[in-house]
Amino acid sequence: MATGKNTALAQAQTLTAPVTVNGKLEAAENVYRFHARKGEKLVFEVNANRLGTPLDSLIAHEDTILKLAYSPDGKLLASSGADRTIKIFKADDLTEVKTLDHQPDWVMSLAFSPDGKTFAAGRYDGSLEIYNVGQLSSAPARQARTLAPNAIH
């Protein structure tokens, strides 16, 4: 399936879900395009180390990526990892905007509000934290509201 010309976004091979891309990448960078409809979920797993290739995912977590969510305007991408961090990236070039370290538990759900001003992180322990997107680049991550599982009835 790979053409060997997937080294820049302009030449990226378009893949239709569901699809599995399997094999050893020879280039330092491989770019693919995925089309999805609103509400459709895409799941990505990068097994670079297990396959013996030096490739590292651009969405760099120290462990498995658990969830990905785009902001409604498509400008931001949020990811959570088994390393208990949330990372926010500029979606167009995957430049990291903010890392929200030391989540109390795995973040199993990420969702932006319809207006894109906040996003929610739902954790495995049942807690939910709401973050203000406008404060991500300057404010500490802990200026969010946390709801304990027993606070919701």
Image (cartoon, helix red, strand yellow):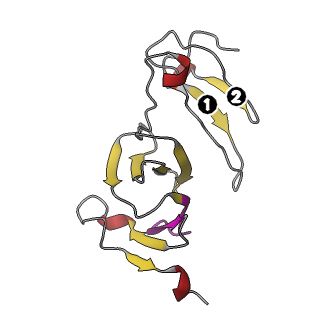
Q: How many C-alpha atoms fall within 10 Å of the one at disc 2: few (<14), some, or many (≥20)?
A: some
**Residue 122 among magenta residues:** yes
Name the residue: 23% across, 62% down: 138
Q: Are marks 1 and 2 in contact (CB under 8 Å)?
A: yes
SS for callout 2: strand
Q: Position of residue 153 (x, y in %)?
A: 61, 90
Q: On screen, 45 above or below 76?
A: above
Which secondary structure is most common in the magenta stretch? strand
Can residue 72 be seen here? The reply is no
Q: Amino acid at mark 1?
A: Arg
Q: Which mark is residue 140?
A: none
Q: Which mark is residue 15?
A: 2
Name the residue: 48% across, 11% down: 27
* Side of 98 relative to 1 (left or right): left
Pick the quarter of the image with the N terminus: top right
Name the residue: 38% across, 65% down: 133
State which quadrant residue 44 falls in: top right
Give the CA separation, mark 1 to mark 2.
6 Å
Q: Which residues are magenta?
A: 108-123
Q: Which mark is residue 33?
A: 1
Q: Amino acid at mark 2?
A: Leu
Name the residue: 46% across, 44% down: 91
Indicate which disc, 1 or 2, sits on the residue closer to the N terminus: 2
Q: Position of residue 49 (x, y in %)?
A: 48, 23
